[in-house]
Amino acid sequence: MKATAIDSRDAGSVAQGLVAMWVAVASFSIADAIAKWHGQEGFAAVQIVFFRYLFGLFPVLIALYVAGLHQVRTARPLAHIFRGALMSCALALFFWGLKYIPLAEAIAVAFAAPLFITALSVPVLGERVGVARWLAVLVGFAGMLVIVRPGAEAFNPEMLILVAGTAVFAMGITYTRRLARTETVTTMFTWTTIVAAILFAPMAWWTWIMPQADHLTGFAVLGLIGGMAHFLVIVAYRNAPAAVIAPQEYMALVWGAIIGWIVWSEVPSWWTWLGAAIVAGAGGFIALRETRLARIQRPEE
C-alpha cells in the first residue's frame, strides 16, 4: 500500500538521522576534550578552530570523491558563507570558554541550543510556536541559569562565553535547516569547512604558537573527527525533524562527565546535574510537542 511505503521510508530516514546524531555527539565530546587540552597548552581558540577546519578538509575531500566535484556548485554562495561564519564563530566561542570551564559543565550549557533553536525557528523559518513550547523554552532557560549561577559566589564569568557560543550555534543550526531545503549535505559541508579555514587563517596567524608533534597529532584528530561529526549533524537534520534530533545532544553530558573525570579528575556539581536535567526536560517536552503536532498536521496518504 502507498501509505505503508511512505511510512516505512520515513521511519528509515528518521532512524538514519538518529544514528548519525548519536555518533556525532560522541565524536564532538572527544573533539571538545582535545580542544580543551590544546587551550590549556596555550593555543588561542582561533588557532584551534583554524586547525580544526584545516584538517577537516580531508573529510571534505572524501565526501567530494564519493559525491562528485559538482557538489561544490551552488546558486547560494553568500548563504553558505554566512552559515560557515556562524558555525565557525560558535565553535571559537565554545573553545574559548572551554579552556576555563570543566568539560561536563561546558557541555551542559550547550544543552540550551535546542531552546535557542525553538525560539529562532519563528523569525528564521516562519514556524509557529505555541504557548506550551514557549513556556518550555522559559523553563529551559531557567535551568541554564541554574548551571551558570549568575550572582553566586561560584559564578564563573567565562560561562557567558559558552552561552554566547551556544546562541550563535543555534543560529547556525537553524540556518542549516533553512539552507537544507535546497542544498545537499556535501555542498553545505564543503562550503562551511572552506569558509571557516579561510576566515580563521589570518586570526590564527596573529595568535600563532608553533605546535609540536603531539599538538599537530591532536589537531589532526580534532579536524578529522570534528569534520566527520559536522557532516553527520547535517545528515541528521536532513533526515529527521529537529524536534527528534536536537534532544539527542543531551547524551553529550554523560560523555563529557566520563572524559572530564578520566582526563582532568573533574566531577560535575549537583547544580550542573540539576540544571542539565531541567534543560533536558524542557527540550524533551518541546521535542514531544513538535512531533505530536507534526503527526496531527501531516496529510493522509
Image (spheres, grey):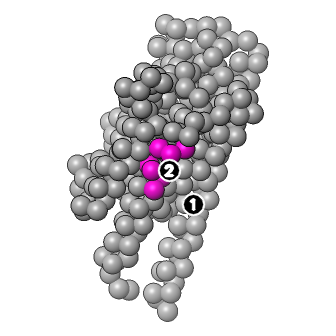
Q: What's drawn in magenta, residue-wise?
A: 273-281
Q: Residue at x 36, y 44 (%)?
A: 141
Dots 1 and 2: beta carbons under 8 Å? no
Viewer-proximal residue among 70 and 188: 188
Asked whether 275 falls inside the magenta stretch, the response is yes
CA gap, disc 1 and disc 2 = 21 Å
Q: Amino acid at mark 2?
A: Ala
Relative image position of residue 159 (x, y in whole percent): 45, 27
Q: Label 1 belongs to which residue?
A: 18
Viewer-proximal residue among 213 and 71: 213
User: Element type at marker 1?
Assistant: helix
Q: Residue at x 71, y 20 (%)?
A: 216
User: Element type at marker 2?
Assistant: helix
Vertical placement of 261 versus 135: above or below? above
Q: Amino acid at mark 1?
A: Leu
Relative image position of residue 162 (x, y in whole percent): 45, 30
Q: Nearer the viewer, mark 1 or mark 2?
A: 2
Q: Residue at x 66, y 14 (%)?
A: 41
Viewer-proximal residue among 118 and 205: 118
Q: Label 2 belongs to which residue?
A: 277
